[in-house]
Image: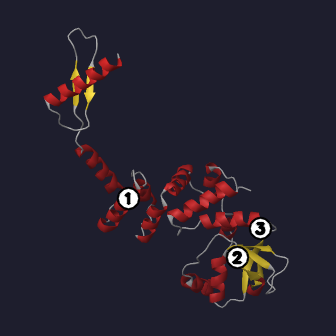
Amino acid sequence: MRHSSHFVEELTARNVVPVGNMVPLSAVEPDPNQPRVTMGDLSDLAKSIKAKGVLEPILVRPQESAADGASLLIISGERRYRAAMEAGLTEIPVIEMDVGEEEALEIALIENLQRKDLTPFEEAEGYRSLAERFTYTHEEIATSVSKSRTVITESLALLKMPSRVREAAQALAITTKSLLLEVLKAETEQEMIQMLEEVDRRGLSRDDLRRQKRDKKSSRPRPFVFSYKPQDKNFNLSLKFRQSQVSKSEVIQTLESILAELRQDG
């Protein structure tokens, strides 16, 4: 199963009235194993549903037994289901799919990844689940969520970010993926956290971070290099020192140390 597009959206795009079978809300219940943890604010959605109804059906699958008598388990569309309850509806349009638990989770995960309000880390974790649990390639993930392969690869790269740095980014509410990827290029955890704090304090963009990096690199003192070329051109000698300034006596002392080691080895 590899979805090339969100087929529920395609179905509803062709209809001005709800598609799917209307069933009582009491016959439906959420899947406790579905990947979405938080539903967010449902007030606007509930108002829309109260005025126009649920135009996009939820996906459900049959379940053999339930303590409360519900015969259908939600695959995707739990926000619409909860908003419909909040709006006071008694029925909801559904598309029933005869799929197992594993396949239902796969559909729910893909549907979840098509949301617009995911954080970069939530998105990356979802892609990883598709890759590891359902053996999707980067190309297949890209097709499933209608994004480029580059976007998928960049998102997965965020999973390399150390947990302390990720926690700092979340605490500072820094959610721009391109900016986070730039922070990830820093050499140490501490440097990453410092960059995040500076981004928060000064409102820096990705381009600002890149410019800072270039300026820092260009202002860094260059190491001193001593070069010697004899007149017969039989060889070239080059010594690179760590410090940017070296005196003539230090060069001579270094050369003498090298000669002493060579004589000792001989």
Numbered disc 2: secondary structure: loop
Left or right, residue 67 beside residue 114: right
- Circle 1/circle 3 CB separation < 8 Å: no
Of residue 252 and residue 174, the one placed in the foreground of this image is 252
Farthest-out residue, right: 64
3D distance between C-alphas at marks 2 and 1: 38 Å
Residue 187 in picture, x, y percent from top left: 39, 50
Distance from the alpha carbon under mark 2 to that under mark 3: 11 Å
Report the residue marked by disc 1: 190
- Residue 249 position in % (x across, y down): 14, 29
Left or right, residue 238 beside residue 138: left
Residue farthest to the top, as pictured: 232
- The amino acid type found where label 2 is placed reads Pro
Q: Residue 85: image x %, image y %?
A: 66, 87
Instruction: Name the kind of residue labelled 1 in the image.
Output: Gln
Q: Which comes sooner in the sequence, label 1 or label 3?
A: 3
Quarter of the picture containing the N terminus is bottom right
**Vertically, is 153 above or below 47?**
above
**Helix, strand or loop at disc 3?**
helix
Where's the C terminus, which quadrant? top left
Colour scheme of the picture: secondary structure
Question: Residue 150 appears at what percent x and percent y?
Answer: 53, 50
The label number, if any, that marks residue 32 in the structure image: 2
Q: Alpha carbon of mark 1 to alpha carbon of mark 3: how far? A: 43 Å
Nearer mark to the viewer, of 2 and 1: 1
- In the rendered view, does 155 fall on the left or right side of 256? right
Q: Which mark is residue 101?
A: 3
Q: Residues within 10 Å of mark 2 (few under 14, many from 20)?
A: few
Q: Residue furthest front?
A: 264
Which residue is at 65% across, 51% downward? Answer: 140
